[in-house]
């Protein structure tokens, strides 16, 4: 006979996923043991009390089968019971208004190309749409929208020249890896010349995309806010001008995201109406072009900037789509308190809601005479509906009955209004609540590679091509429930305002368009100027999601977005927030371990290396599996304990730490720089077989 069916591992698939080891899961107390073996043992312990006549207990007995079947059926029930603390925490966070963070859009710099037949510069309005294939190569196009108006010039950058002393010029190779815009010694009098070719005078503005070359993994810190000057040297004064024939005319800077070539970004200039072809004095043998000049008028750079590229007709865009003038649909059974948007997920802070209170108002004419008739009112005045914009808030609990506020759930698109006690109710009406505008999108799919945003979705005459010369940055998927439960208690403490230093690190993750997984804040620290604490400055180190491409380092765009978000929305007035990427110490471990006899040596080496990598990882390492502590000491004994916990490892007789290529003494801890993180390299693991236990 074959073995009885209840002796098999039937129902193994019922084991809850919560039983699996998940380093991101929130530790929960076990209210009651939930394994089938425990249930079976408890039932068997009651057999003598309730059924004393059952004496022939053997593996093939039907009663044993029923006992095991009962244990298998009770196992998922008890596992759900053990999830009660998690359920209570979720409900408490819901009451407090804590929800998983919505998906955030990525950002990119777009370059537009204008046909040579264009009679003038082409105006591209804010919200111009282009498309790209998603990063994973599947699904629909990722839609990008421009964030500013752009005046695209029907011109091209033909050459770039650097002017030195005595009117000496040096041509820059546009296809090179990098160049010095002011030479080896950037000092007053030196200039950068940019020559534009084309038959049409560009204007009234032109936009340049500046790419600053930086050491790999080390973008410069980005400051934002502040009122008091930092104790640093005076930055050099740069002046833009155009060469109109033979004389220079000033060009006003409208937008400068580069901070004087300190970082990459867009630079927009207001140019004169008249801009004739010319040739700079001292530059012979060149055809006339329309020249831009950037001159150092005073001061010097502490370290000369290095540029990798200068491009024309560039504007910033985000991976989002804007919806205009949509009437909200009331939800059934909501008593006109909840309404839904048609598109999701909604990007935070993009929704503008107007509520029509009924009737119309009349703007008074400029000359108000006593006997003005209705025709005169219609001619001089304007009829306007009584629509008012309501304010979006995080919760309604703190508002009075006449406050015109609402709450948005970005994931479901549900808008909740007040009930007359907390928040004002919506006045009765039909389709009287509308979304003036809101944006949908977000997620890591928008972090596309360079040269992939090339599909024109909007139409503007004479625009022939669009492209992103550099990869898109940022973009985050919706936060998981487990991550929200970890963040919830800290969020309740911060309440969207940076009161303590820890609040800056928490709120940095909420910056729109920034790819941030972890953050660490330090009072009085400017990452670019270490030394004594600087009053009024908060340094914030951020770490993006790991893309398995070396140490996770946030790009300049993410740093800028975090700095602007914290300084404008979270920090007190006058505080300067400086956001930077942390330094990574490269760690290599040399270890000799003793394994049990007969084990697979290769498997032991791979498992030991993975254990070390996971322990040192900046996002999932450390003793709590939530990321290595900023500036945390790497202790020799902690590594040894990690390795000896492996099932097939019996001892670790030797372990050396090699940090940044320097070998430390045996049994010596490694103390990194303040606020630095660790990154594991390829380790050297030697295994020898020991005696069996």
Image (cartoon, rainbow, N blue to C red):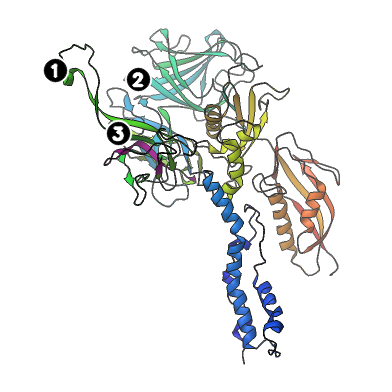
Instruction: Please determine whether, in this image, residue 602 is positioned above or below residue 273.
Output: below
The label number, if any, that marks residue 421 in the structure image: none
Residue on which the image places disc 1: 373
Cα distance in 3D space between marks 1 and 3: 26 Å
Instruction: Please determine whether, in this image, residue 488 is positioned above or below residue 192.
Output: below
Residue 448 visible: no
* Residue 372, image x, y percentages: 16, 15
Q: Is residue 308 left or right of residue 532?
A: left
Dot in front, 2 or 3: 3
Check disc 2 and report its element: helix, strand or loop.
Answer: loop
Q: Which residues are magenta?
A: 415-443
Name the foreground residue: 28 vs 289.
28
Instruction: Please determine whether, in this image, residue 593 is positioned above or below residue 313.
Output: below
Question: Of callouts 2 and 1, which one flags the residue occurring earlier in the amino acid sequence?
Answer: 2
* Quarter holding residue 132: top left
Residue on which the image places disc 3: 357
* Quarter holding residue 461: top left
Residue on which the image places disc 2: 202
Cα distance in 3D space between marks 2 and 3: 47 Å
Q: Is residue 168 left or right of residue 535?
A: left
Dot in front, 2 or 1: 1
Q: Kindly check if marks 2 and 3 are in contact, taking CB atoms under 8 A apart as contact.
A: no
Question: Of callouts 1 and 3, which one flags the residue occurring earlier in the amino acid sequence?
Answer: 3
Which residue sits at x=35%, y=49%?
A: 331
Q: Is residue 378 magenta?
A: no
Check disc 1 and report its element: helix, strand or loop.
Answer: loop
* Residue 415, image x, y percentages: 40, 43
* Quarter holding residue 580: top right
* Residue 360, image x, y percentages: 24, 28
Q: Is residue 377 left or right of residue 242?
A: left
């Amino acid at each position: 006979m074959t073995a009885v069916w209840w002796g098999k591992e039937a129902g193994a698939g019922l084991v809850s996923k919560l039983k699996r080891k998940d380093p991101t899961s929130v530790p929960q107390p076990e209210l009651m043991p939930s394994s089938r073996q425990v249930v079976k043992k408890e039932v068997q312990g009651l057999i003598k009390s309730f059924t004393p006549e059952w004496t022939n207990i053997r593996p093939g007995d039907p009663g044993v089968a029923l006992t095991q079947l009962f244990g298998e059926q009770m196992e998922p029930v008890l596992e759900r019971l053990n999830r009660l603390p998690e359920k209570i925490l979720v409900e408490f966070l819901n009451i407090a208004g804590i929800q998983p963070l919505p998906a955030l859009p990525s950002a990119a710099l777009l370059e537009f190309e204008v046909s040579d037949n264009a009679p003038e510069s082409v105006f591209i309005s804010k919200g111009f749409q282009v498309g790209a294939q998603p990063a994973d190569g599947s699904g629909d196009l990722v839609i990008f929208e421009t964030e500013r108006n752009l005046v695209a010039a029907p011109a091209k950058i033909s050459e770039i020249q650097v002017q030195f002393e005595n009117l000496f010029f040096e041509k820059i190779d546009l296809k090179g890896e990098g160049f010095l815009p002011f030479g080896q010694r950037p000092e007053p009098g030196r200039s950068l010349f940019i020559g534009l070719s084309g038959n049409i005078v560009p204007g009234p503005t032109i936009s340049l995309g500046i790419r600053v070359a930086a050491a790999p993994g080390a973008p410069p810190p980005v400051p934002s806010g502040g009122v008091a000057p930092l104790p640093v040297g005076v930055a050099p004064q740069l002046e833009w001008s155009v060469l109109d024939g033979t004389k220079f005319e000033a060009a006003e800077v409208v937008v400068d995201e580069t901070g004087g070539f300190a970082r990459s970004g867009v630079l927009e200039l207001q140019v004169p109406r008249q801009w004739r072809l010319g040739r700079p004095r001292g530059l012979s043998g060149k055809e006339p072009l329309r020249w831009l000049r950037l001159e150092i008028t005073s001061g010097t750079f502490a370290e000369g900037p290095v540029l990798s590229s200068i491009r024309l007709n560039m504007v910033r865009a985000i991976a989002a789509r804007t919806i205009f003038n949509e009437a909200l649909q009331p939800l059934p059974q909501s008593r006109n308190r909840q309404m839904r948007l048609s598109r999701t997920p909604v990007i935070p802070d993009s929704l503008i809601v107007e509520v029509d209170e009924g009737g119309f108002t009349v703007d008074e004419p400029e000359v108000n005479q006593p006997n003005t008739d209705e025709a005169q009112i219609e001619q001089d005045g304007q009829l306007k509906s009584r629509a008012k914009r309501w304010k979006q808030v995080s919760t309604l609990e703190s508002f009075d009955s006449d406050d015109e506020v609402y709450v948005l759930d970005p994931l479901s698109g549900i808008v909740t209004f007040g009930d007359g006690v907390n928040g004002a109710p919506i006045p009765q009406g039909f389709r009287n609540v509308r979304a003036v505008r809101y944006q949908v999108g977000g997620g890591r799919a928008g972090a596309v590679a360079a040269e992939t945003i090339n599909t024109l979705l909007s139409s503007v005459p004479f625009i022939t091509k669009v492209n992103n010369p550099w990869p898109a940055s940022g973009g985050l998927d919706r936060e998981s429930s487990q991550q929200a439960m970890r963040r919830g208690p800290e969020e309740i403490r911060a309440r969207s305002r940076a009161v303590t230093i820890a609040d800056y690190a928490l709120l940095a993750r909420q910056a729109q368009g920034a790819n941030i997984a972890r953050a660490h804040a330090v009072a009085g620290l400017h990452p670019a100027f270490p030394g004594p604490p600087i009053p009024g400055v908060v340094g914030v180190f951020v770490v993006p999601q790991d893309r398995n491409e070396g140490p996770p380092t946030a790009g300049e765009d993410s740093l800028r977005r975090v700095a602007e978000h914290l300084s404008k929305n979270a920090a007190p007035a006058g505080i300067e927030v400086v956001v930077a990427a942390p330094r990574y110490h490269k760690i290599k471990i040399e270890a000799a371990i003793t394994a049990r006899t007969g084990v697979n040596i290769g498997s032991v080496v791979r498992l030991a290396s993975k254990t070390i990598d996971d322990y040192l990882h900046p996002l999932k390492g450390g003793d709590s599996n939530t990321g290595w502590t900023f500036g945390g000491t790497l202790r020799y004994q902690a590594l040894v304990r990690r390795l000896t916990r492996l099932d097939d490892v019996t001892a670790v007789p030797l372990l050396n730490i090699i940090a940044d290529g320097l070998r430390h003494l045996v049994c010596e801890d490694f103390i990194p720089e303040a606020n630095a993180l660790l990154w594991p390299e390829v380790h050297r693991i030697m295994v020898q077989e020991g005696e069996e236990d």
